[in-house]
Amino acid sequence: MPYCHLLPFAEIHQWEVETRYPDFFSKDFEEWCDYVARDSCQRMADDPRLIGYFYSDCPTWVHTRAQQYKQPIFDPAKLDSRTGRDELSALASRYYQVTHDAIRRYDRNHLILLRPL
């Protein structure tokens, strides 16, 4: 049966108030993503039933949810300025580039699927 596989690059759901956000620009984040991809993608690269990979969840870049939720990764007030929007774009671009590159190092053929927000 065809299937997709979840890759836990960053467990950063808004309801998990105890977890910390990783520094997406750090070497540690790159190494973690490489480890996750190597552990899963290398094993599955030749599996003909595999459709592709999902990230475990899309980051909560910004949100305006109730206080019981964890603060967003990015301060939504910064979106009022061009500088803030550029900063968020750089942050998201970095996250997706690092995770994409990690997957492709070990599997060049399967799809990379993102969960819609």
Image (cartoon, rainbow, N blue to C red):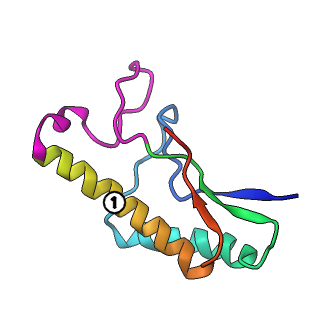
Residue farthest right in this picture: 1
* Residue drawn at 33 percent across, 60 percent down: 93
* Secondary structure predominantly adopted by residues drawn in magenta: loop
Q: Nearer the viewer, residue 18 or 58?
A: 58
User: Where is residue 40, by image quadrant?
Assistant: bottom right
> Measuring 59% from the left and 50% from the top, which residue is drawn there?
56
Q: Residue at x 65, y 70 (%)?
A: 110
Pinpoint residue 83: horizontal percent, then vertical percent.
Answer: 11, 48
- Whether residue 100 sits left or right of residue 71 in the image: it is right
In screen coordinates, is 90 left or right of 19?
left
Check the image and report above or below for 10 versus 46: above
Mark 1 Cα-neighbour bin, 10 Å: few <14, some 14–19, many ≥20: few
Q: Quick check: is 73 in the magenta stretch?
A: yes
Tally of numbered discs: 1
Tell me if I can see residue 107 in this picture.
Answer: yes
Residue 87 spot, x, y in % from top left: 20, 52
Magenta span: 60-82
Would you say residue 32 is visible in this rendering?
A: no
Image quadrant where one finds the N terminus: bottom right
Q: Position of residue 37 (x, y in %)?
A: 60, 71
Q: Residue at left 30%, top 55%?
A: 91
Q: Quadrant of residue 64?
A: top left
Query: Of all residues shown, which one is farthest toward the top?
Result: 66
| Residue topped by disc 1 | 93
Type of amino acid at the residue the image marks with label 1: Ser
Residue 25 vs 34, above or below: the answer is above
Secondary structure under tag 1 reads: helix
Picture quadrant where residue 111 is located: bottom right
